[in-house]
Amino acid sequence: MEWQLIIERLNSLLSANRHNELRGALMMLNVVDIAEFLSTLETDKMLKVFRILPKDISADVFSYMDDTQRQKLIESIGDSEIGSLISDMFIDDAVDFLEELPAGLVKRVLANVDENSRKIINRFLSYPEYSAGSIMTIEYCDFHMGITVHDALKELKRTGVDKETIYTLYVLDAQRKLLGTVPLRKLILADDDVKIENLMNPNFICANTHDDQEAVADLVRKYDLLSVPVVDKEGRLVGIVTSDDIIDVIEEEATEDIEKMNALLPSEDEYMKTSVWTLAKNRLPWLMFMMISGIFTGLIILHFETVLTAIPDLGLALTACIPMLMGTGGNCGSQASTLAIRGLAVGEIAPSDAPGILWKEFRVATIVSVVLAVISFVIQTLIFSRSCLVALTVSLAMIATVVLSKSIGCTLPVLAKKLRLDPALMAAPLITTIVDACSLMILFFFSSVIIH
């Protein structure tokens, strides 16, 4: 059945107040789909449907609702319902939700949860934003040294139902220092009398509470992990970061990089929920920078006005070639910067590889520039019937521009990484702006030499 038909059926049951049938229909859906259905309803109807859901389902559905819907729901339900809802959520989901709420609502929520949960949530909220501590969860399975496989499986069956993940188990000492990890598969297949420390991997990968979330995502990608243990400065296990949170981090970081690469300040909200003023504010700084840089490009043309007017035919021909030269240079720079930014993002290259990257791009640029220069020469002479001198000038400028733009495009992101800046800042808009000015300087340099 198509989703639209499902929505219509659910709406008809809701309109007819056939709550038992509606509840049964909802239980046949995934919690993500239930949350999507709630997002289509007005606040009063959303509240009615949410209260129909069983308690164990409602918390999961709540975690998949968008921030606006969740805020409306919190504002509409009673204090006791708030306490029950937050208590049934995984800690990391509750913390993510509270971070988006206004301060007044956060106080109301925390006032209606038990003291232990309040302390845990406050501790999570104290971690720096976008750190491993801020996205970790405490719902994991851990065991102490000396326990047998039989006892570990017995404990796992007793407590595992309340954990966010049980695929990786953690072995601790008496001070809760992390000693190793045990895959669930290895535990299940082992003999009952084997000690758990004989199964653990002591060479585990972990993150610190203050590590950047992007660094944690890199660990998951590099080592193919389902979860990453998070330890404090003393090596004590304080939480884990699960794969679902890592997917969210990757999406956030990719979105931020795309925005930066296209000369936009990162936005916290979805496009349709962001105000026009906020969108304008995020776009203006780079647009002003590029407009001002365009003025400098115009000044370069004015400075070399004598070159353009010394020989009228030459000046006219050169002027007609400026857009082609600037466009080609910008495109070449963008290609090189895109590959460099992507390589830095996924760990394929590092700042120490700068000489090798520059040498490779120089060779690529040499091949590309010669081919483009030959094509340009043919077009200038055969199609536009320009003199060989003009065609040669443009072709030489093309070679120099392509080589320089690719060199700049691959170098600036690496330099940004070395200076602890985001390489995405050195993307197409900035590269194009720099290359435009350089291409004009190169063209007028060759023109001046030929004229003299």
Image: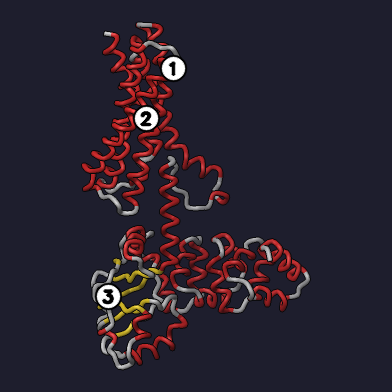
Q: Earlier in the sequence, mark 3 or mark 2?
A: 3
The residue that mark 1 highlights is: 320
In percent of width and height, residue 306 lies at 34, 9
Quadrant of res 199: bottom left
Mark closer to the observer (3, 1): 1
Residue 131: in sight, yes or no? no
The residue that mark 3 highlights is: 236
Quadrant of res 20: bottom right
Q: Which quarter of the image is occupied by the N terminus? A: bottom right
Looking at the rendered structure, the secondary structure element under dot 2 is helix
Give the answer, above or below, for where 275 lies relative to 168: above
Looking at the rendered structure, the secondary structure element under dot 1 is helix
Residue kind at label 2, given as amino acid type: Gly
The residue that mark 2 highlights is: 329
In percent of width and height, residue 446 lies at 29, 17
Q: Which quarter of the image is occupied by the C terminus? A: top left
The one nearer the camera, 370 or 97, is: 370
Residue at 40% x, 15% y is 381
- State the CA–CA distance, disc 3 to disc 2: 53 Å
- State the CA–CA distance, disc 3 to disc 1: 68 Å
Q: Earlier in the sequence, mark 1 or mark 2?
A: 1
- State the CA–CA distance, disc 1 to disc 2: 16 Å
Residue 179: in sight, yes or no? yes
- In the picture as drawn, the residue positioned furthest to the top comes out as 311
Residue kind at label 1, given as amino acid type: Ala
Give the answer, above or below, for where 77 lies relative to 402: below
The one nearer the camera, 346 or 300, is: 346
Residue kind at label 3, given as amino acid type: Arg
Image check: 452 left or right of 97? Answer: left
